Image (tube, helix red, strand yellow):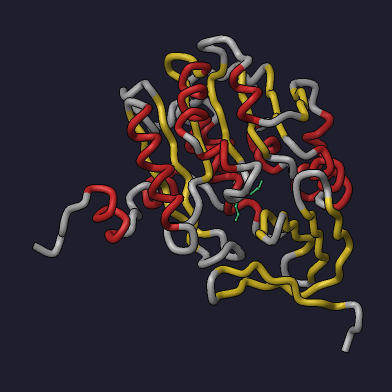
Amino acid sequence: MNNDQIWIDENHKDSRYGLKGKLVVRKKTAYQEIIILKTFEYGNALMLDGCWMTSDRDEKYYHECLVHPALSNLSKINTVLIIGGGDGGTLRECLKYKDITAIDLVEIDEEVINLSKHFLKKVGGNSWLDKRLKINICDGCKWVKNIKNNYYDAILIDCSDPSDFANGLFSTDFYKECKRILKEKGILATQSESPESFKKIHIEIIQSLKSIFKTSSTMYAFVPFYPSGIWSWTFASNNEKDFLIPKHNQIKSIENSCDVWNLNYQEGALKMIPNKILKELFKQNTND
Ligand code: SPD
């Protein structure tokens, strides 16, 4: 029995989702408690305020699905905004698009970036050194208020689960600002929680985006170590034409570079809405 191995759990109601490993970081910042656990199965894993965020083994299930449906939808990309994303995984996937000229990464807690650079090298890697990146330590809700209209081609919201300081990133005011600062053909992508373990907020995110943008769509797939395993990402735009139809000229090489995402995976995942979520969204009884 190895004495330095402990179990760390994410607790949800009467369920818990745990990993066993060696605690390498437990730190309280001004915003949250950060834990990094070195595990045998999942590599290094990051937990923020009791919720698993990413792990070496699992992260591609999440980051590839947040980034590629959105960016592959655009034929030309200049400016990208990442809100959150302090572990660097979303950044790494964005940097595969050679035409991007500038990425603003807006993270509220600098310690997440510092610790990720050190302990999650497999996630962010050399992406942190890319000349196109500008890191801004700032609340995402404040950041968007100070950006001029029609500025970004894509906004990727890679936030934590709802909490005192993250709640704003799920609000309609915030989404309205995102809409204002997106270019005409721009696209927003947000992680939209689990239809099982975060059902209420999941439905609220979809409803808010539907009410604000001309078009939106939700994709369901797996992140095995997140609570319940099923996760979702929602995409929204004011450009209804060809929404989520891949058009970027690098698609083939990007598909080849991915471990999880490809165009078939995306097509299936965009159709995988659970019926019980559909019923709640449209308040209709499909059993009739
Ligand atoms: N419960 C997990 C919520 C996912 C939040 N984002 C993860 C950050 C990975 N970059």
Residue 241 or residue 138, whichever sits in front: 138
> Would residue 171 be found to the left or right of residue 134 on screen?
left
Residue at the location (41% across, 32% down)?
236
- Give the quarter of the figure containing the N terminus: bottom right
Residue at the location (76% across, 76% down)?
7
Residue 219 % position (x, y): 42, 47
Residue at the location (81% across, 41% down)?
113
> Can you name the residue that lies furthest to the front here?
164
Residue 79 % position (x, y): 61, 18
Residue 97 visible to the viewer = no
Residue 196 visible to the viewer = yes
Q: Quadrant of residue 147?
A: top right
> Can you name the residue that lies furthest to the left here?
288
Vertical position of residue 146 compared to residue 209: above or below: above
> Would residue 15 be found to the left or right of residue 142 on screen?
left
Residue 40 % position (x, y): 79, 72
Residue at the location (48% across, 45% down)?
233
Residue 155 or residue 97, whichever sits in front: 155
